[in-house]
Amino acid sequence: MAKRAMGKGLDAILGDELEKVNNVRDKGAHKLVGTVANISLDRITTNPFQPRRNFNDDALVELIQSISEVGIIQPITVRKNGMNYEIISGERRFRASKKAGLKEIPAYIRLADDRQLLELAIVENLQREDLDPIEIAFSCKRMMDELGLTQEQVSKRLGKSRSTITNFLRLLKLPALIQAELRELHKNENLDESSQGSSSVVFTMGHARALLNLPSEEDQIKVYYKTLKYGLSVRKVEELARELKSKERKKERNQKPQELKHLEQQLKDFFHSKVSISMGESGKGKIQIDFTSESELQKIIMKLND
């Protein structure tokens, strides 16, 4: 049988003043903020800004069993919203407590506006939960887009280097297919940004950076699967990226402008022979007129002399 959660009831803390306290400037707020109190699960809602979207079912079963045996050890954190409460952090404990049959749960109570709630939710979840790399990347982007923070400010909030934040944000430039697979690949692993392929994680931040140098999404997906299949190192992926970019540039150089193709056709019709024109970026080039016999050569010369 589940043990009763620790903490006092809210009525014991504020009594009739409870409903009126929603802001740090309200009377009685000092009694409520930071307090650990037992809150009915029916009065708690999940956080709409929660960065985590996937919850490991196996880990949740273990947590449910633990809560059923010993109760809640670590209180969740909530924001008061009228007479209800929104979760800032601890959604896994909240979900597990409901499944374990608890009626109430201990919670730290905070007062915050939506902007503060978003920042608190993201920061606390990134610090306490093992989010997959794409969730981390989206969370960083949300802090920048919705809170107006710079990469430098995000790095300070999260206690990570700016280069680490940049690397996570780069993941969002990868094709959606790769992003989806990365979420599965790294479900129980951490990306090692310094790994060169020796990590137990096959695909690293270094691989992601190398893929982003490829000229097209098609190339990125092709090399991604090749990386997984053959366990390619970051250096090898970088080499492949350089080779493919070089081929792409060569292909672009070999693609003739429509004007040159039109001119080639005009000369072919005039000489009744195959004609090719090549021109470099500087404007220099050459015209090549093919012939298959001496008589064809004489005809070409006659036309040139006309």
Image (cartoon, rainbow, N blue to C red):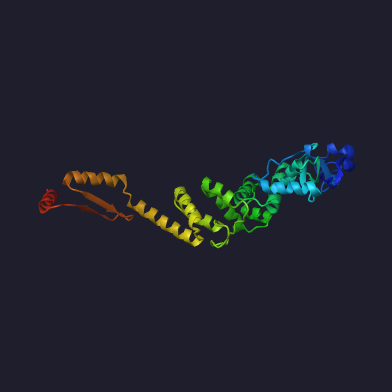
> What residue lies at 84% left-to-right and 36% top-to-bottom?
19
Asked whether residue 97 appears in the rendered view, the answer is yes
Q: Quadrant of the N terminus?
A: top right
**Relative image position of residue 174 (x, y in whole percent):** 52, 49
> What residue lies at 57% left-to-right and 55% top-to-bottom?
167
For the image shown, how many numbered marks are present on the structure?
0
Give 181 or 139, whichever is nearer the viewer: 181
Is residue 101 rendered to the left or right of residue 285? Answer: right
Q: Quadrant of residue 97?
A: top right
Is residue 133 rendered to the left or right of residue 275? Answer: right
Asked whether residue 89 appears in the rendered view, the answer is no
Give 192 or 62, whichever is nearer the viewer: 62
Give 229 or 262, whichever is nearer the viewer: 229
Q: Is residue 234 above or below residue 115?
A: below
**Relative image position of residue 149 (x, y in whole percent):** 64, 50
Q: Is residue 239 above or below residue 99?
A: below
Is residue 302 rendered to the left or right of residue 289? Answer: left
**Relative image position of residue 233 (x, y in whole percent):** 50, 61
Q: Quadrant of residue 196?
A: bottom right
**Relative image position of residue 150 (x, y in whole percent):** 62, 52
